Image (spheres, grey):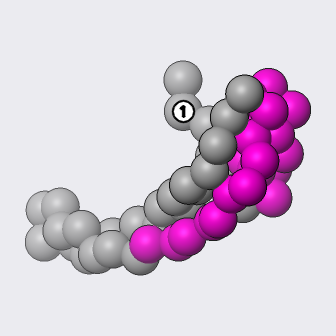
């Protein structure tokens, strides 16, 4: 199963189920090459504390 989330959705899920707090959200953009095709890849990185 593959699921994609918007940034705000992922933060809300982490807050609800992991009690995420005192967090910072970073984004990372990369270019991957597969079969001579360039694929733009975006990642969401969440640094924070959980209870």
Whether residue 6 is visible, yes or no, is no
- Decide if residue 16 is on the left or right side of residue 29: right
Residue picked out by circle 1: 2
Tag 1's secondary structure? loop
The range drawn in magenta is 8-28
- The structure residue drawn at horizontal position 55% and vertical position 70%, both measured from the top left corner, is 26
- The structure residue drawn at horizontal position 81% and vertical position 40%, both measured from the top left corner, is 15
Where residue 38 appears, as percent x and y from the top left, is 26, 75
- The structure residue drawn at horizontal position 13% and vertical position 72%, both measured from the top left corner, is 36
The N terminus: image quadrant: top right
36 vs 17: above or below: below
Where residue 33 appears, as percent x and y from the top left, is 18, 68
- The structure residue drawn at horizontal position 84% and vertical position 45%, both measured from the top left corner, is 12
Q: Nearer the viewer, residue 19 or 10?
A: 19
Q: Check if residue 21 falls in the magenta segment.
A: yes
- Decide if residue 26 is on the left or right side of residue 12: left
């Amino acid at each position: 199963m593959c699921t994609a989330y918007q940034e705000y959705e992922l933060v809300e899920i982490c807050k609800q189920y992991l009690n995420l707090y005192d967090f910072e959200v970073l984004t990372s953009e990369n270019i991957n090459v597969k079969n001579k095709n360039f694929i733009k890849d975006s990642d969401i990185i969440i640094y924070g504390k959980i209870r």
